[in-house]
Amino acid sequence: MDEADDQQHVANRVLPVWEHVVADMEATAEEYRESGWEALECHPGDIATITEGEGHTGLDVVLPDDEFDRVESAYDADGDFDEVEVFRAVEEGIVFAVAALKNATSQTAILVPTYYDSDTSRDFIQMVKEEGELRLHLRPLDQRRVLTFTQHDSAPFLPGGD
């Protein structure tokens, strides 16, 4: 199977589940709002694993400009998003997760859905296990700024949760 066929195979496995992941993220955001929190939903245009680059390893998440601008404003105004709640599922080797990055002081949650193929991301998984943490890099397409959220407990992002 060549690279294009492999990418199409992954896309065929991702798309049906991805719609449910996004719907779950939107429902979770609504639950936060009902509890009095501000909930910012992210709808990534692209997600990639990064295994090289000092301090820039992790998951690279490209957001639409308007969503990135809202996240950036909350990040600048609220400071630390030092809590995370992760909802994970593994379907046909694809690891899906929704990270709710939380700032309890401002009662703001940033909800970020992600996915990666555990079969083709073995180096990424090994790197995360060795580093003991996972970085979520949120950015707009033009890369004018990258917001990095470091998760010190990487287990919820791994295929087996370990």
Image (cartoon, helix red, strand yellow):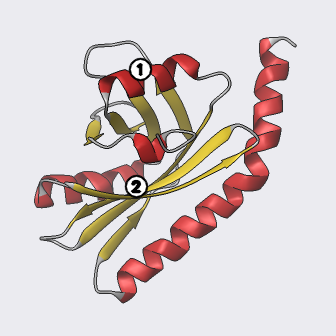
Instruction: Specify whether 162 is left or right of 21.
Output: left
* Rendered location of residue 97, percent (x, y): 53, 51
Q: Position of residue 49 (x, y in %)?
A: 50, 27
- Give the labeled residue for mark 1: 127
Spatial CA span between label 1 and label 2: 32 Å
Residue type for callout 1: Met
**Few, some or many residues within 10 Å of mark 2 (<14, 14–19, 20+):** few
Residue 71, numbered label: none
Q: Earlier in the sequence, mark 1 or mark 2?
A: 2
Say which residue appears at 37% left-offset and 82% top-offset.
33
Can residue 85 be seen? yes
* Quarter occupied by residue 31: bottom left
Residue 63 can be seen in this image: no
- The residue positioned 22% from the left and 60% from the top of the image is 74
In the displayed structure, 84 sits above or below 3; it is below
For numbered disc 2, what is the local secondary structure?
helix
In the picture shown, does residue 62 fall above or below 87? above
Residue 141 locus on image (x, y percent): 44, 34
Residue position for label 2: 66
Q: Position of residue 51 (x, y in %)?
A: 43, 17
* Image quadrant assignment for residue 128: top left
Q: Residue at x 76, y 41 (%)?
A: 92
